[in-house]
Image: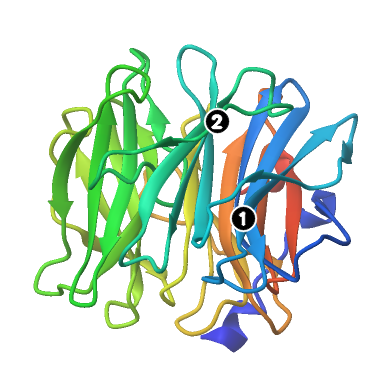
Amino acid sequence: MRLAILLFPILAFAQVKQTFIYESAPFPECHASTIVETAPGEFFAAWFGGTREGAKDVAIWGARLKDGQWEAPVEIAREKNFSTYNPVLFHTKDKKLWLYYKFGLSPATWNGAKIQSVDGGRTWSGKEYLAAGVYGPIKNKPLVLADGTIVSGTSVESDFAWTAWVERSTDNGQTWTKHGPIVFPDEPKGIIQPAMVTMGKNLRMYLRSTTKIGFITYSDSKDGGKTWSSAKITNLPNPNSGIDTVTLKDGRIVLIYNHTSKGRSPLNIAVSKDGDKWSEPIILESEPGEYSYPAIIQAADGKVHATWTWKRKRVKHAVIPLDALPK
């Protein structure tokens, strides 16, 4: 499969602008980026960085993009004697910018926390810890529905089971209700890290799966995220690696993922009109190494922005014009 992928056309991706968010930083490794538009043409990205994933010196770092240039990374959250993980940026309906993150000794024992900004990420509030059992968006941005309801994809990774859930909030994240579990039939250690999209009046999540399942899976909701179907497989491979997705303003769904059954290269984008049939995967990265844990959004000007881990050393940012994507 891997050799075949390398023959797929890059199409109009000569139009795609790829840059590193930083060239050097006060930490040797990084992972799990997230990105949000804070004003027209201005963006904020965050990730975790430290000695290595799981080390106690790992903190949440961020950087602003203004006037076409990324500013130097700054530390925005740290936990004493614990590693931090998987920051997620998004705006609530009241226009506040939130950053949710996890902290703990491992994903099996971590807890959730959040901070907020009212000035586009220039300054941040003190941290608030989430109630036990509430994690916030586990890797990918949540949906914020027209009425302000937050539908957040989360998951639990125990030694026995990997299971997805949804957390909903109708008060901008002050309180949460939990919905699920969303499971893959007959496979306890199965699916995590939902990536949420709208499909007309319905909602869909695409999920990372273990290599035993081997494909990206999906689940649907017809009641605003309160109840969900059992997970089913797509025809897109998944090597037990993070994904993300976004519904464009024209209704197309864009998915960013590793189109391979093993490893975390290549990194690809696929497009769908109906959420079921996908274009041939477009190549973002194809060299040996790890290109993983992507995030993807559509900006106010229609362009698509993506970030991802580049060999655990840096965070890469891509700007993708709409006409570079399959129709």
- Residue 289 rendering spot, x and y as whole percentages: 68, 81
Which label belongs to residue 230? none
- In this figure, what is the number of numbered marks? 2
Give the alpha-carbon distance from disc 1 to disc 2, as whole Å. Answer: 15 Å
Q: Who is closer to the viewer here, 303 or 209?
A: 209
- Mark 1: few, some, or many residues within 10 Å (few <14, many ≥20)? many
To which quarter of the image does residue 232 belong? Answer: bottom left
As drawn, the residue found furthest toward the front would be: 80
Q: Position of residue 180 (x, y in %)?
A: 14, 47
Q: Which residue is mark 2?
A: 126
- Nearer to us in this view, 70 or 6: 70
Q: Disc 1 marks which residue?
A: 59
The answer to whether residue 282 is left or right of residue 177 is right
- For the point 45% across and 15% down, the residue is 93
Quarter assignment of residue 231 = bottom left
Residue, x 53% and y 70% (percent of image)? 258
- The reply, left or right, for residue 180 in relation to residue 155 is left
Residue furthest to the left: 186
- Identity, as a three-letter code, of the amino acid under mark 1: Ala
Question: Residue 242: x, y in percent?
Answer: 47, 63
> Mark 1 or mark 2, which has the lower sequence index?
1
Does dot 1 land on a helix, a strand or a loop? strand
Q: Callout 2, which amino acid?
A: Gly
